[in-house]
Amino acid sequence: MSFYPSSLANVNNQYLTYVFCVAETQGLRLPVYQIDYTPESDYKNLVPNSVKEYILMICGNENHESVDFYLNDPRVKMIVKNYPRMINCAADVPGAYEYNVKRDTTTGRQRFVIEREKENILTIPLGSCNNYNPLLNYNKNSPGGFVGQWTQFRQEKVEKIINSFGSDICPYDWAFYKGFGPFVQSDTSSDWSSSLDTQTYSNFMSKSEVAFVLSGQSPETYRLFEAAMAGCIIVHDNLPDIWYYKELPYVPLQPESFIAVHDYIQANKKDLKSHTASWYQRFASPVAVGKKIAQTAKHLGI
């Protein structure tokens, strides 16, 4: 039986627990130990000496750093993790993140270049935050928009989208908060609400036709998967060139000329919503990801 030492301190713990339960039903036999990424990890203390081999689940790592050093423990037979390995081209500038892009020859869209990793390292989707519980609803009664934590980058993107409508009223809703879910930061002196609770966010996504997925520290966000769960149309910047995004029918974000994007969404929204929901079930749902983990372990002979 797999041992998954979960902790609600991890924002996607409920999703991951479901994922590994599915993997076990699909034949995963080794115990699974979960840790948070750190370059100087003391994770071995979490694993009893009696455990001769195991699978390591690494959470966090928004900077897309290498995890190869974890394999120095010969007992680690496979690593499952979030965030693909990418090289930060702006690493010399404190707090700056910039990644190389290439053009997808199939879709013509730009993709972030990911580094090839060892065969026994598998990157999986972030999934959803704990207690996120939307209704999959195709008959949306709200155009959608963005509600979430404030960053300067996100504010600038939103302002450009609003300005692109000129004298017309932007139909989308926007709200910035100082915290989300478990990351509550009370600040009653600010001009925006202090925190967005998970149920309010779930309700907003359930009603929204369009979800603007504005990147934070990493180009990957929980919001993308949460939007797909709720059957929203996803508007996003560039994404990493990794297996679970290959068939994602997202709409590229073009803030300066968003009217054209808006018109495209209105003309294709029925197909976009259904195709996005289908993509989630095939590539990002706990069932799909659990099966992927079990298949990879079987291929490795573990």
Image (tube, grey):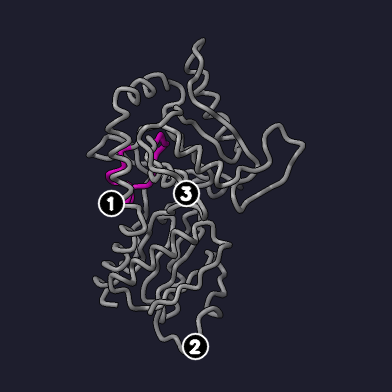
Name the spot of residue 220 as percent of width and height, x first.
45, 47
Q: Nearer the viewer, mark 2 or mark 3?
A: 3
Residue 103 at x, y percent in the picture:
30, 38
What residue type is disc 1 on?
Answer: Arg
- Which image quarter holds the N terminus? bottom left
Residue named by callout 3: 133
Q: Which mark is residue 295?
A: none
Please tell me whether mark 3 sits on a helix, a strand or a loop.
Answer: loop
Comparing 299 with 16, the one in front is 16
**Camera-nearest label, 1 or 3:** 3
Identify residue for label 1. 282
State the separation of the CA atoms marked 1 and 3: 19 Å
Residue 98 horizontal/vertical position (percent): 48, 43
The residue sitting at 30% across, 22% down in the picture is: 267
Name the residue type under label 2: Asn
**Which region of the structure is painted magenta?**
234-249
51 over 239 or under it: above or below? below
Residue 173 on image: x %, y %: 53, 28
Q: Which residue is mark 2?
A: 49
In the displayed structure image, the side of residue 194 where residue 231 appears, left or right: left
